[in-house]
Image (tube, rainbow, N blue to C red):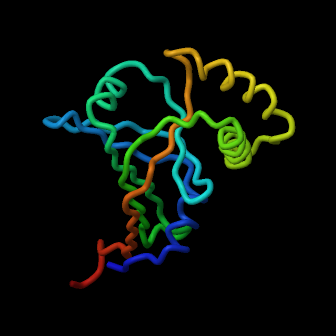
Amino acid sequence: MKHLDRQEMIDILHKVRDGVLALTDGSLPYCLPFGFVYVNDAVFLSLFPTGRKWEIIKKNSNVCFNAFCWNDENTEWYSVVVEGGLVPVKDLETIESVVRATMQKVGLDPEKYTEKRMEYYSKNLVNDKGLKIFKIDTRSMTGRSMPILIGKDL
């Protein structure tokens, strides 16, 4: 197993579109798939502050996020784990940078979609149940890679 350096981890976080957010209420773990972007040295997620995940986050905002992928030949996997506290983003400039990065990551033209998305997020800043942007306030970030072992003599 190889430890990834910071730039390798950042490259993976820019490449991978989805990850898994792990939460706990202190007794039971709860994991959810999430699309995300990595902007200004942080992982950002969009989520509705409702449901089971929100009840857990209100009790314990500490999270673990994992982004995982394979190389093009499917002979080696890569994983980045980010641990930290989940905090709401209320600064419209930061929200706009996240929206633009999200549009680029999913292949949409930011110039075409940013204004409409910003109107939506601006309105939801005061809507308790509306979609919000959250940042993982990173305490640690680690990464590993490993070639597959299936079919190899050990």
Q: Is residue 150 left or right of residue 147?
A: left
Q: Nearer the viewer, residue 18 or 64?
A: 64
Which quadrant of the figure contains the N terminus?
bottom left
Q: Which of the 4 image quarters holds residue 52? A: top left
Q: Write the residue at 51% across / 46% down.
A: 18
Where 38 sits versus 33, above or below?
below
Residue at position x 21%, y 33% in the image: 25
In-image side of 71 versus 81 (left or right): right
Give the residue at x 69% y 39%.
99
Q: Position of residue 150 (x, y in %)?
A: 29, 72
- In the image as oriented, which residue stretches furthest toward the bottom? 153
Q: Nearer the viewer, residue 152 or 142?
A: 142
Q: Using the image, determine if residue 59 lies above or below residue 93.
A: above
Residue 121 place in picture, x, y as percent = 66, 26
Q: Is residue 67 above or below residue 63?
A: below
Which residue corresponds to the image point at 73% horizontal and 29% vertical from the top-left?
118
Front residue of this view, candidates 138 and 142: 138
Q: Whole-percent x and y of residue 140?
A: 37, 62
Quadrant, the C terminus: bottom left
The image shows a total of numbered marks equal to 0
Q: Residue lying farthest front?
A: 91
48 with respect to 117 (left or right): left
Q: Residue furthest right?
A: 111
